[in-house]
Amino acid sequence: MAEAGYPGAEANTFFGLVGPRATPTPIVTRLNSLINEGLRTPDIMGLLSKTGTEVHPGSPADFAAYIAAQHGRWVEVGQAAHVHVN
């Protein structure tokens, strides 16, 4: 995008696990711990790095903040482009 004259413009694909809002905190905490543990293993890190994937293990709060930031950003882009999302 920078080469096309849009410095600072970037779009990323991200993956994460979400569940029902009412999922009990101990379950969320345990799943988060196991997923982060798995993502940090050499086999998984190696496999994902071969595809150019950056791994960012984190907390549920980190992921929620990231999703909120992305949503806000793309709503702003959509409004500027006069794109309406239902």
Image: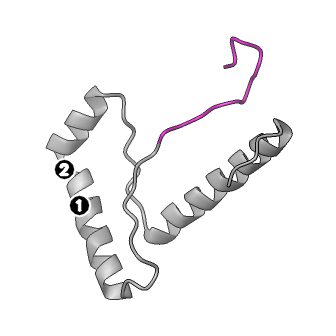
Outermost residue on the left side: it is: 43
Q: Residue placed at 40% from the left, 66% from the top?
A: 18
Specify the principal SS of the magenta part.
loop
Q: CA distance from mark 2 to mark 1?
A: 7 Å
Q: Which residues are magenta?
A: 1-13
Please determine whether, in this image, residue 86 is positioned above or below residue 74: below
Tell which of 15 and 79 is nearer to you.
Answer: 79
Task: For the N terminus, give its image quadrant.
Answer: top right
Q: Within the image, what quadrant is residue 22 found in?
A: bottom left
Instruction: Classify 9 as above or below 24.
Output: above
Q: In which quadrant is the C terminus drawn?
A: bottom right
Mark 2: amino acid? Thr
Q: Which residue is mark 1?
A: 37
Q: How is the image coloured?
A: one colour
Q: Is residue 67 above or below residue 19?
A: above
Residue 60 x %, y %? 45, 70
Q: Find out whether residue 9 is within the magenta segment.
A: yes
Left or right placement of residue 31 versus residue 1 in this view: left
Question: Residue tagged by mark 2?
Answer: 41
Category of crowding for the residue at label 2, using alpha-carbon neighbours closer than 10 angstroms: few (below 14), some (14–19), many (at least 20):
few
